[in-house]
Image (cartoon, rainbow, N blue to C red):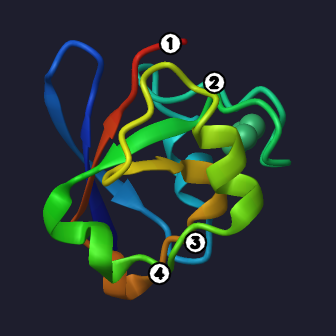
């Protein structure tokens, strides 16, 4: 089983099982300390905002314009590491991916 490292809002690191084929958001929303993902992945709520660990940023497909537009409206947006986790497919190659759940904004 592939894995993901998730840092919660208190800074605690969790090593979680992650199923390839799901969106990163779908893995995170099952966790008590994960994301709300209110819009269900329609790229319209930004409640699935995460920071991707710097060492993984270049291994993910780039964000599309609609994702970037929404991200830039968030106060806690960070140019280099912010992503909407509903727009990121989790694949076997991403096993070990480390993300931090962004503050509720
Ligand atoms: S779940 Fe709403 S934007 Fe990602």
Identify the secondary structure beneath mark 2: loop
Q: Earlier in the sequence, mark 3 or mark 2?
A: 2
Pointer 2: what residue?
36
Q: Earlier in the sequence, mark 2 or mark 1?
A: 2
Residue 28 % position (x, y): 50, 41
Pointer 1: what residue?
104
Q: Quadrant of residue 93?
A: bottom left
Of residue 39 and residue 70, the one placed in the foreground of this image is 70
Between the C-alphas of marks 2 and 1, the distance is: 9 Å
Q: Is residue 70 above or below residue 45?
A: below
Of residue 18 and residue 59, the one placed in the foreground of this image is 59
The reply, left or right, for residue 5 in relation to residue 87 is left
Pointer 3: what residue?
89
Are dots 2 and 1 in contact, CB under 8 Å?
yes
Identify the secondary structure beneath mark 3: loop
Foreground disc of the pair 2, 1: 1
Q: Earlier in the sequence, mark 4 or mark 1?
A: 4
Identify the secondary structure beneath mark 1: loop
Q: Earlier in the sequence, mark 4 or mark 2?
A: 2
The reply, left or right, for residue 42 in relation to residue 13 is right
Are dots 4 and 3 in contact, CB under 8 Å?
yes
The reply, left or right, for residue 55 in relation to residue 46 is left
Between the C-alphas of marks 4 and 3, the distance is: 6 Å
Q: Residue at x 41, y 76 (%)?
A: 60
Residue 46 % position (x, y): 66, 32
């Amino acid at each position: 089983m592939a894995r993901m490292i998730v840092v919660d809002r208190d800074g605690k690191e969790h090593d979680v099982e992650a199923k390839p084929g799901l969106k990163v958001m779908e893995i995170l929303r099952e966790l008590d300390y994960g994301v709300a993902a209110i819009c269900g992945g329609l790229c319209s709520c930004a409640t699935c905002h995460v920071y991707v660990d710097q060492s993984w940023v270049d291994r993910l497909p780039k964000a599309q314009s609609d994702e970037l537009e929404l991200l830039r409206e968030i106060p806690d947006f960070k140019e280099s590491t912010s992503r909407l986790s509903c727009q990121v497919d989790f694949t076997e190659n991403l096993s070990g991916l480390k993300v931090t759940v962004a503050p509720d904004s």
